Amino acid sequence: MAALVTLEGIEGCGKSTQAGLLAAHLEDRGLETVLTCEPGGTRVTAEIRRLLADPASELDPRAELLLFLADRAQHVTEVIRPALERGAVVICDRYSDSTIAYQCHGRGHERALVDELNAWAAGQLVPDLTLWIDCEIGIGLERARVHSGGPGDRFEAEPTAFHQRVRDGFAGCCKDDPERVRRIDGNRDQASVTASVLATVDEF
Ligand code: TYD
């Protein structure tokens, strides 16, 4: 059964760990599963990811938006669509809701413009299910800091108010499309979050 399942949330919410556990769970059930992420996931997009993460990149906010969209266009064409056409389940760590949360709510780009560009870059490919791993800013940033063991990337260096706007952005995505975007309480221990993730996907 082909499906695109995306995981979203602020820095350090635990979605990458959950994405890996979910992929293993689906494989155990005999489903062909492709685990991938944005930005990144292909040779071309690895270059884009490097530019986006580098604290030395003084990126104009429009250039930043277009780089995320370039990443998505390449990733959809090269990885996601072929996998869906083979009948695989694709688990993608971040996708278009991140662009709304970070570039609209975080950076202030106009929503209607980003909606149009998002749809265009993704070739109209919308996730079947999105798991929003929601956690408190303080918890997420602390986990991200411990995990990166250093100053972190360009986004981790943003002030708390930026991350608060991003979190509000994800809440808005959930409110606008509650059938697709399911909130999972990410403030709990990892095993409890995993139990909710697997239950939500199994029900789907
Ligand atoms: P990454 O190292 O993958 O962080 P994380 O583990 O938190 O996913 O870096 C991705 C960063 O890019 C992350 O801070 C969120 C940001 N981002 C956007 O701003 N817009 C987007 O469309 C996407 C996909 C990611």
Image (cartoon, rainbow, N blue to C red):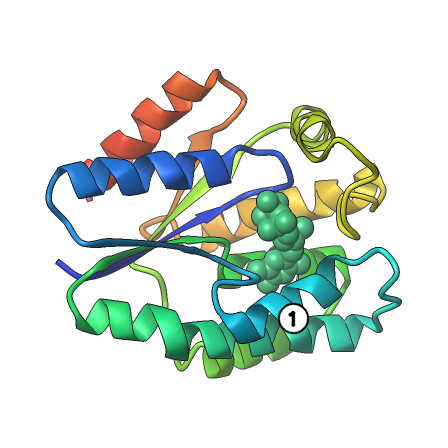
Residue 22, horizontal then vertical, whole percent: 31, 38
Viewer-closest of 172 and 148: 148
Residue 81, horizontal then vertical, whole percent: 30, 74
**Would residue 88 appear left or right of 143 to someone viewing this image?**
left
**Would residue 63 appear left or right of 135 to someone viewing this image?**
right
Going 52% across and 58% down the picture, which residue do you hit? 97
Going 83% across and 44% down the picture, which residue do you hit? 157
Residue furthest to the front: 43
**Would residue 165 appear left or right of 173 to someone viewing this image?**
right
Question: Quarter of the image containing the C terminus?
Answer: top left
Question: Quarter of the image containing the N terminus?
Answer: bottom left
Residue 14, horizontal then vertical, whole percent: 52, 33
Query: Which residue has dot 1 on it?
Result: 48
Q: Which residue type does callout 1 highlight?
A: Ile
Secondary structure of the residue carrying numbered label 1: helix
Residue 57, horizontal then vertical, whole percent: 85, 65
From where the camera sits, is residue 125 visible?
Answer: no
Going 38% across and 18% down the picture, which residue do you hit? 192
Q: Quadrant of residue 136?
A: top right
Give the mark count: 1
Mark 1 surroundings: few (<14), some (14-19) or many (≥20) residues within 10 A: some
Q: Quadrant of ligand 1?
A: bottom right
From where the camera sits, is residue 12 visible?
Answer: yes
Query: Relative to 106, is 187 above or below?
Result: above
Query: Relative to 146, is 178 above or below?
Result: below
**Would residue 97 appear left or right of 160 to someone viewing this image?**
left
